[in-house]
Image (spheres, grey):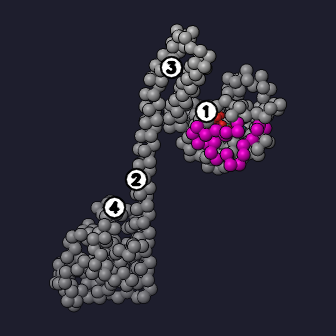
Amino acid sequence: MMIPYPPINEDQRLKALKNYNILDTLPQAEYDNITYIASYICKTPISLVSLIDEKRQYFKSHLGLDILETSRDVSFCAHAIHNHNEVFTVSDARLDERFHDNPLVTDEPKVVFYAGMPLVTKEGHALGTLCVIDREPHHLTDEQKEVLKRLSQQVMYLLELRQKRFLNKTLQHKLEAYAQDMGAFAYSASHDLQEPLRTAKSFLELLERTHADKFDETGKKYMQLAVGSMSRMTQLINDLLEYSRSGNSDEDCDDMDLRKVVEDIAEMNKLIITEKGVQLELGVLPVIKISKAAITQLMHNLIGNAIKYQAPGLKPIIKINASDLDTHWQISVKDNGIGIEEENQKVIFKIFKRVKTQGAYVGSGIGLAICKKIVQHHGGEIWVESEYGKGSTFYFTIHKI
Ligand code: ADP
């Protein structure tokens, strides 16, 4: 018997095989279907998907043979993996000097005929074979060999797909862990920053109250500027806290009637709406599966901006509409406000980004970043279409559950 020698790139080949995470896995119908078709077309009682591990051959699928593995020394497939392009054929193993005294030939399953097509990766590593076996002398026609070649490619497609899914899952877990870390970091950093800031602010206020008479006008101005900066920093930290909390929660997903959500927001902002003469026009709005807090915050930010960024002398007209995109809802909030230059239309969704030319409008640049976080958490996107000086339409999509 001739013991099969390893291919020259054996270390890399074994590494490639391990990367597929296929060894010692449970039987799967998609591989069993391939061995069924191979044995049916080639008219053999046995067909295997065999993977050549360091010391053994492991059968991912084994039709007509009730074993899961054998030692590599007796493996026919370990011979077959040397020629990547050809079906390796042994017409009668009993008469072949490489196999005549092989225990798989002399004992059960008493292999006589063997034909195996290597399973070759894109990088050129033969992981094993798709093979057919008979207990009698047998012959494969060219057509049958061609089918065996193509089916071995199918096995490789399955393995590639499996590896991609595995990598995607690993990446997804890593991303989730990273996002959780970042959220926890932002929360605790901003939370911990509040305390020293509060103390510094109260000492400054105390200093102002008790020693103000000792300062000249410039001193008093500096004091006020310092208190003002402290207040702005407190606001920024609160915004950061709100941002780190928003968008992550899966809790309380409910059927939310968007019209009712908008009407509630209008009710809450009755004062400013009346004061500014806001005209709110609602189209047919759907019921969306989302948490009340998330959709309220999202719509509140967009409607709030549509009122805030109003062109001088104009009364805000805000139109809210929806379209059904099959898998998603698309919602639009259109205003007749100051508009946004094209170069700013993407950056405004980043945290703390504001349009510099709009310094007259008060804000911290966090509202749209929160909207983006909420929307992405619900499998959607957010963007704006706007003509500077003429108004803006904000669109977002939400995945239907
Ligand atoms: P904030 O309003 O607190 O600045 P946002 O994140 O809500 O923060 O908005 C970011 C920036 O996008 C705003 O500073 C403003 O320049 C621009 N913006 C948002 N909504 C509108 C709108 N409806 N019309 C014009 N500009 C807008």
Q: Position of residue 332 (x, y in %)?
A: 70, 42
- Which residue in the protein does label 3 denote? 201
Q: Are marks 4 and 2 in contact (CB under 8 Å)?
A: no
Report the span colored magenta: 336-358
- Tell me if the residue at label 4 has its CB under 8 Å from ligand 1: no
Q: Is residue 348 magenta?
A: yes
Give the mark, 1 or 4, whose residue is nearer the N terminus.
4
> Which residue is at 77% across, 37% downward?
337
Residue 186 visible in the snapshot: yes
The disc placed on residue 21 is 4
| Vertical position of residue 156 compared to residue 168: above or below | below
Give the mark, 1 or 3, whose residue is nearer the N terminus.
3
- Which residue in the protein does label 2 denote? 170
Residue count near mark 4 (Cα–Cα under 10 Å), binned few <14, some 14–19, many ≥20: few
- Camera-side mark, 3 or 2: 3
- Camera-side mark, 3 or 4: 3
